[in-house]
Structures are given as C-alpha cells and as structure tokens.
Image (cartoon, rainbow, N blue to C red):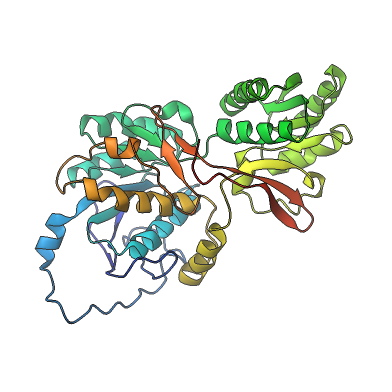
Amino acid sequence: MAERVKSGQARRWVLKGATLGFAMLLGGCEIVPDPAAPQTSAQAAPAATVTQPSAAAPVPVANREAQRNQVALLVPLTGPNAGIGQSIANAATLALTDSGTERIRISVYDTAGGAAAAANQALAEGNRLFLGPLLAEDVRAVAPLARAARAPVIAFSNDASVARSGVYLMGFVPAQSIERVVAYARGQGVHRFGGLVPTGVYGERARQAFTSAVQRAGGQVTAIQSYDRTPASARAAAGRLNAQGAYDAVLIADTSRIAAAVAPAIRRNARILGTELWGTETNLVAQRPLHGAWFAAAPGGMFEPLSSRYRSRFGNDPYRLASLGYDAVLMTVRITAEWPSGQPLPERVLRTQIFTGIDGPFRFWSDGVADRSLEVQEVGPGGVRTVSAALQDPN
C-alpha cells in the first residue's frame, strides 16, 4: 500500500509493495500525493484493499523497514514533463505490487523543482539507488552527488553521453535503433542510403550512428542533409537530398510528424526509415505518408496489457515511457538478492546480468548504456506490424 511522508525541499511520495504473489500485470496499488502537489486522475485513484494471510504472525513494522533497501525514483511530477513522470511513477507502483517484494522501499521525488535538491533529500533520507532522472541535464546534476554517496543511477534518458561510471541508461538510444533498422533494410536488398537529420545534438548523433551503421552493413551512404526542426526546412533538405544522389532508402531522424510532412518530397519507391522516436508515438497509423516505413523499437507485445491495466487502475492512458518505470522496479527487485540491506549496492550485479520486462531483455555494457533487443516494425493502414522480431537475448 502507499504511505504519505512529509517532504522537505522536494515533494516526494513513498511506494510500498503489497504482499502478493508475483504475476505479471496483476494487482494494484497507488501513490498518495503530498497535499501541496496538484491532483491528477492517476493520483486520485482509490487504493486497493489487500487482506494479509492470517496464518502467520505479522512482522513488526520496524523490523520490516530495517530489512528494506531504500530506492529513490526521480521523475518530474510537476511542470511540462509531469505527464511522463507521473506515468513512470504509476507504472513503478504496479511493478512493485506485482513483485510482492518486502525488500525494497521506493520513494518518489519530484525533479521539476531541481534534480540536485531532490537527490540531496533522497540521500539524506537513506536512499542508496536512484531510478531516474528522466532528462539528460538532470542526470548530469544528480551524477556527482550520487557518485560521492556510492549510490548508482539508473537513468531514463536516451542521451548516451551522460552514461559513465556509476550512471546507467535504461532509455532507448538512437544509435541502437538506427543500426537495427539499417541492418534490416540492408538484408532486404537496400544498398544506397540517404539521410535527413535535424540540426542539434540529437541530429549529430543520429548522423554518426547512421553512417557507421551503413558502413558496418556493407551499404553506401549517397547523401545526407541537415535541416532546422521544422517541416518546411525538412522539405527543403529533401530537395537538396534528391539533387545530391540516388538512394533506395532514406532515414528521417525525427518525429513521425516531421517525417510525414517531408515524406511526399522523398523519391518515389524509396523506403522511409525512422528512429526510436517513433516507438513512443501513438499516431503513426494516422500518418498516411509513412505507410510502408520501417523503424526499430522495443517489442510492443507486453505494453498493451500493461496499458490496459494502467487505464483500469488510474483512469487514463500511460505515456509509452511508463514501461521504463515498470522495468526499472523489476530489475531492482531482482538485484536485491545480492544487495545486503543498509549497504551500498554492489554495481557488479548491474553489469553481469540480463534483465527483462515489458520492453524485452536488456543488459548494461561497460559504457553504462542498456543494450536492447529491438524489433523492426512497419507502419501500415491496418496498424504497425512486426517484420523482424527481437532476439530473446540482446547482442
């Protein structure tokens, strides 16, 4: 069940798992908000009633608390990214209940008022593992504080540059999705590749990943053009791309909205390729110019059952990134077997295991980035279908 705890510098919530047998997508719990926080439909959901077995004598609360490892979930619960953060927190609640564990206590801290302040409060209150933050700049703010306290960070960012010693990334990084979709396209006979990438950090990383992926796959990059992140600029870049050279497929490293706007300017019969950004969007089928396009993303088979249960429990749809919160808690439950309560988490347990969850299997490489098994999906009028399944074990 959930318990409200008075907060200091940062708003926070505490999640406690009910004593239920583990079953994926079963059970229910809630986050009880700080009175100062804005109310949402997710926060207002009624608590589930759990009846404890009567055969065993209850363990004193003080003893249970002493045996729990304390974990901080850092997400934005107010501000422009509050919807994403609340979805992650709610999904974490579901995972904690599903696991039935009594070995961890998860406190949720709002990073919107300052990630460093939230992290400092979490450390002062005894937390020794961070799940989150979501944004790269927040990860950079939290990392030195966590490192000094020997508290690993499992961040939800997709910016691989923030991964380092003690900082791990669960987010979906563009390099992996680009490599996967390029390799698939090459296997389908595509040899000449063109690219449209936005200006900025994401675009530059997408460009580097794209050229490297095509080279490894034995293809040829015939043209790449950059654009400001607007439909008009992207269409102008497509015109320059067409004048630069022939291509059989073109990567549009942007959202489906930008990709759909520029697609009519792409040469006829050329295959459009997308990135991991499309995997978090819900309106792909409505983007008719993208029908036939390929992109690589986490396996989607388990997200819809989670989404359905989330809607039933909280009264609204989760953001696609909610699965990160669910899987992060499942991962934490698994590693508690090798994490003595009250002690720093031995990081080797993060680097030597394969974890799994809603988004399929993953493991952390030496650079701290989660290596994931991705499937290739095709957008069509009847929906998004899998054309190349994810491997059961990430490579």
For image coordinates 14% across by 62% down, the residue present is 64
* Residue in the image at 47% along x and 36% along y: 371
Q: Position of residue 88 (x, y in %)?
A: 44, 53
- Can residue 77 be seen in the rendering of this structure? no
Residue 208, placed above or below residue 91: above
Q: Is residue 105 left or right of residue 361?
A: left
Q: Position of residue 325 (x, y in %)?
A: 42, 51
Q: Can the viewer see residue 371 in this picture?
A: yes
Residue 137, placed above or below residue 79: above
Q: Looking at the image, which residue sits at the far right?
A: 268
Name the residue nearer the viewer: 232 or 363: 363
Q: Residue at x 38, y 43 (%)?
A: 132
Q: Tell me if residue 51 comes above or below residue 21 in the rendering.
A: below
Q: Position of residue 197 (x, y in %)?
A: 68, 27
Q: Position of residue 164 (x, y in %)?
A: 37, 26
Q: Which residue is at the far bottom?
A: 54
Report whether 83 appears left or right of 200.
Answer: left
Q: Quadrant of residue 286?
A: bottom right
The residue at the point 24 percent across, 39 percent down is: 120
Residue 255, picture quadrant: top right
Position of the N terminus, as image quadrant, is bottom left
Q: How many marks?
A: 0
